[in-house]
Image (cartoon, rainbow, N blue to C red):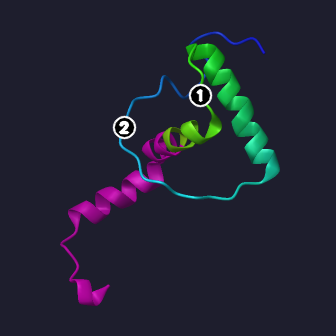
Amino acid sequence: MSCTPGKLRLGPLPRSESVKLTISLTRDLKQALDDYAAAHSQVHREAVDAATLIPHMLQAFIARDRGFKAIAKKRAASPETPAAAR
């Protein structure tokens, strides 16, 4: 697999605090994540596995989701809803 730096959406991984979450994936998705991890490792010259990449991929996805940003902005602008009303 031949890759050049800057060709992947996910850049170098920052160090951060984490919480554990267990998920189930299809075999095809797991293979795609493993392939992406191999490409990321080659491009950034730092070994990384799919499990390490997933949180960063999800964070990047959420950060680019315009619909979610609009909802979050609307929620932040509205007055706080009492807990009993939720």
| Residue in the foreground of this view, choosing between 79 and 4 | 4
Q: Earlier in the sequence, mark 2 or mark 1?
A: 2
- Magenta highlight on residue 63: yes
Q: Quadrant of the C terminus?
A: bottom left
| Residue in the foreground of this view, choosing between 22 and 3 | 22
Task: Give x and y (percent) for residue 81.
Answer: 23, 79
| Residue in the foreground of this view, choosing between 63 and 20 | 20
For mark 1, give the secondary structure: loop
- Considering only vertical position in the picture, is 61 above or below 21? above
Label 1 crowd bin: few (<14), some (14–19), many (20+), radius 10 Å: some
Task: Give x and y (percent) for residue 79.
Answer: 18, 72
Q: Amino acid at mark 1?
A: Val
Task: Determine which residue is flagged by label 1.
Answer: 48
- Magenta highlight on residue 76: yes
> Which residues lie in the magenta part?
58-86
Q: Amino acid at mark 2?
A: Ser
Q: Name the residue located 22 percent from the left edge and 68 percent from the top edge.
A: 78
Label 2 crowd bin: few (<14), some (14–19), many (20+), radius 10 Å: few
Q: Which mark is residue 23?
A: none
Q: Name the residue located 65 percent from the left edge and 15 percent from the top edge.
A: 42
Examine the residues drawn in magenta and state their main secondary structure. Answer: helix
- Considering only vertical position in the picture, is 78 above or below 85? above
For mark 2, give the secondary structure: loop
Left/right placement of residue 8 relative to residue 21 reads: right
Task: Determine which residue is flagged by label 2.
Answer: 16
